[in-house]
Amino acid sequence: MMTVAPNPINIEKVFDMQKNCVFKIMLISGCICGFSSIIFAEHFPLLVRAENIIVPPSTGPNTHIIVKNRKDAPFSCKMQIKYPKGWNISPGEIDLSLKPEETRKVSITIDKAIDLKSNSYPVEITVISGGDQKVFKRNIFVATTPVFKPKIDAKLKDWEPAVPVSFVTKDRKTIIRTGWNKKYFNVAVEVQEDKLSGYKAKSDKPIDAVQFAIAPRKTNTPTAVDQKSQRYEFLIVDSPGFLSTDKCFLLMRPGDKIAIAGKDRALAPLHVKDVKVVVKRKKNLTVYECSIPFSLMPKLKPMTGRDYQMSFLVHDPDGTGIRDLGQFSGLWNSQRSKFAWSSWKGVKWEQKPPFDSKLEWGFCTTKY
């Protein structure tokens, strides 16, 4: 049942506290909840995440909402689901009964949806259990890789067929684009930053870089040091100097011992010459562009309509620090993992490990 705090609350002060806390004050039936009736995210029994969509919404895709019961006892609730206005969602409401610590995928069918240029779609999920309720909100995006063949020159003039994924970290924007053709997987990343620190082979100073991981569908990140990797992982960097070319390093392959992810390895022996990389500055932007032969990723097996897994880290050590697409994608704190990303000499990690490197993604023919 709802209760009201015995002393008056300065609601402006409470909302200021929101910026630094993980809870929200629920406004229910016109009453303002006091501190005794706040539902803290860290204590709520259910974790909820709406997955990103791997094809344009207008195509009528299926997607999922993932739920996890954190209790060591059964948990039952009603879940009310809202996607953007005008979309037909089925089901819009569902009753859940979860076993202790059970994780479940709820399938969602989308119809009569409209594609947005912003590639940002609000989702609101209300969970009601007994007298408690909690609202989960996030903006999902389309994580898809259309067919086209760009020229790798960091000018991005021929990337119009791509579906950009944008997110902001400490007021600095990152824009990610992916594309594919018969022979190559292509990546372009725009990083808003004040300056660019490039790679030098004989220096261990922190550098700016884009790190990304690609894995076949239905693969998982190891949870123990004696397990093996199931991903391909790359690092692309600027390499300043006369006659020097920008570089790509292959940090991890499927079958590699996951223990090497925690080792600060020198990058030079990991250089792959078959990947074309161009990195350029444009005012306050750094543009990274690369083309990776599928021959380097034989387990990926690209095909229109096939899903795979991918994520990105942007390293900006003298600016925002690490920008993690997994955080922007609504992964839970329990999905941070020291095995999800590889280290190297000079990298500047933050106190907590990054989020998992396996987000839902998909190959498609066109964004239209």
Image (cartoon, rainbow, N blue to C red):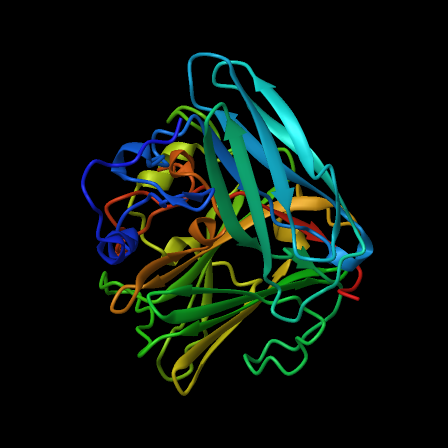
**Residue at the spot 34% in from the left edge and 29% down from the top edge:** 43
Q: Residue placed at 33% from the left, 76% from the top?
A: 196
Question: Is 144 on the left-hand or right-hand side of 20?
Answer: right
* Residue 146: x %, y % from top left: 73, 62
Could you tell me which quadrant the C terminus lies in?
bottom right
Q: Is residue 320 above or below residue 340?
A: below
Toward the viewer: 305 or 119? 119
Judge left or right: residue 112 versus residue 1: right
Name the residue located 36 percent from the left edge and 56 percent from the top edge. 267
Residue that sits furthest to the bottom in the current view: 283
What is the quadrant of the N terminus in the image? top left
Residue 33 figure quarter: top left
Q: Is residue 235 visible?
A: yes
For the question of whether residue 219 can be seen, the reply is: no
Q: Is residue 17 left or right of residue 111?
A: left
Residue sitting nearer the eye, 300 or 76: 76
Residue placed farthest to the left in the image? 7
Where does residue 190 sit, x and y in percent of width and height?
49, 73
Which one is nearer the viewer's eye here, 80 or 233? 80
Left or right of 325? Residue 110 is: right
Q: Position of residue 218 (x, y in %)?
A: 63, 33
- Name which quarter of the figure residue 158 lies in: bottom right
Q: Is residue 312 above or below residue 354?
A: below
**In the image, is residue 366 above or below residue 37?**
below
